[in-house]
Amino acid sequence: GDSVTQMEGPVTLSEEAFLTINCTYTATGYPSLFWYVQYPGEGLQLLLKATKADDKGSNKGFEATYRKETTSFHLEKGSVQVSDSAVYFCALIFSGTYKYIFGTGTRLKVLA
Amino acid sequence: DAGVIQSPRHEVTEMGQEVTLRCKPISGHNSLFWYRQTMMRGLELLIYFNNNVPIDDSGMPEDRFSAKMPNASFSTLKIQPSEPRDSAVYFCASSGTGFGDTQYFGPGTRLTVL
């Protein structure tokens, strides 16, 4: 079945370090791909998305590129801040459907 | 713009009591979702409404759970009777069309059943 796999956390980095959080998916069709972020005590909020192959989503210094050939949507940021500490969820959804398939989430801790 | 509003933010109750969680979606959105988040099971979709009509309630764990959406601006999730294993964070989310669309999450209700 369709699924999303994320790297296990927590990921602990020092401020200004480079971030990569891996996400791969298994899908029978061509979904849209999303990264959501959950800050402590809050709900999920959209970070970025990409709707077709080779699209790059970007927001707040974060980027992810929809790679159909490797079925991946890895999240990257060049220089993390303490305020980026949160849980990051990779997700997919098919056009015309309502049900997201979420990964298990990756907790990021950024130390000053 | 106000986002999705949920109340209460925290609820502590005793086993066997009735619990009602409330949600006000973003104005103009016609799709509403209830999720449950636990460490063990992650995020689970409980029920999906489109235009106030329940479309998919296959994620509702059992008959103790019920959800209603009497109008476009209000939804409730009720647990009766509550059990300790219902302890979780419950999120409400809304989206414009529901289909392949960004979902906007509320801040959640943290439920503790003693």
Image: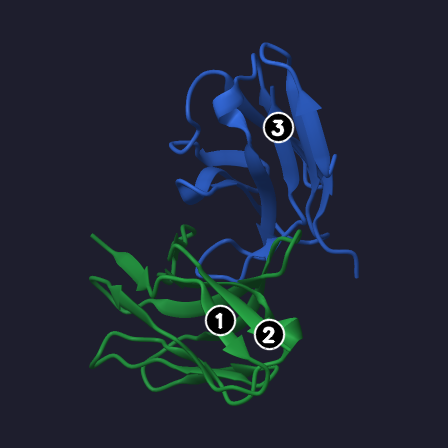
Can you give x and y, in whole percent of width and height, for residue A65 in the image?
A: 38, 83
Q: Secondary structure at mark 1?
A: strand
Query: Callout 2, which amino acid?
Result: Leu
Q: Secondary structure at mark 2?
A: strand
Q: Decide: marks 1, 3 in contact (CB < 8 A)?
A: no
Q: Which label belongs to residue A12?
A: 1
Residue at the disc numbered 2: A111
Q: Chain of mark 1?
A: A
Q: Chain of mark 3?
A: B
Q: Residue at x 31, y 60 (%)?
A: A4
**Frontmost residue, B62 versus A93:** B62
Chain B shade: blue
Residue at the disc numbered 3: B112
Q: Chain of mark 2?
A: A
Chain ID, green in image = A
Side of B46 relative to B51 (left or right): left
Side of B43 relative to A1 (left or right): right
Q: Residue at x 60, y 43 (%)?
A: B92
Q: Decide: marks 2, 1 in contact (CB < 8 A)?
A: yes
Q: Residue furthest top?
A: B16
Give the Cα separation between the discs numbered 2 and 1: 7 Å
**Frontmost residue, B28 versus A33:** A33
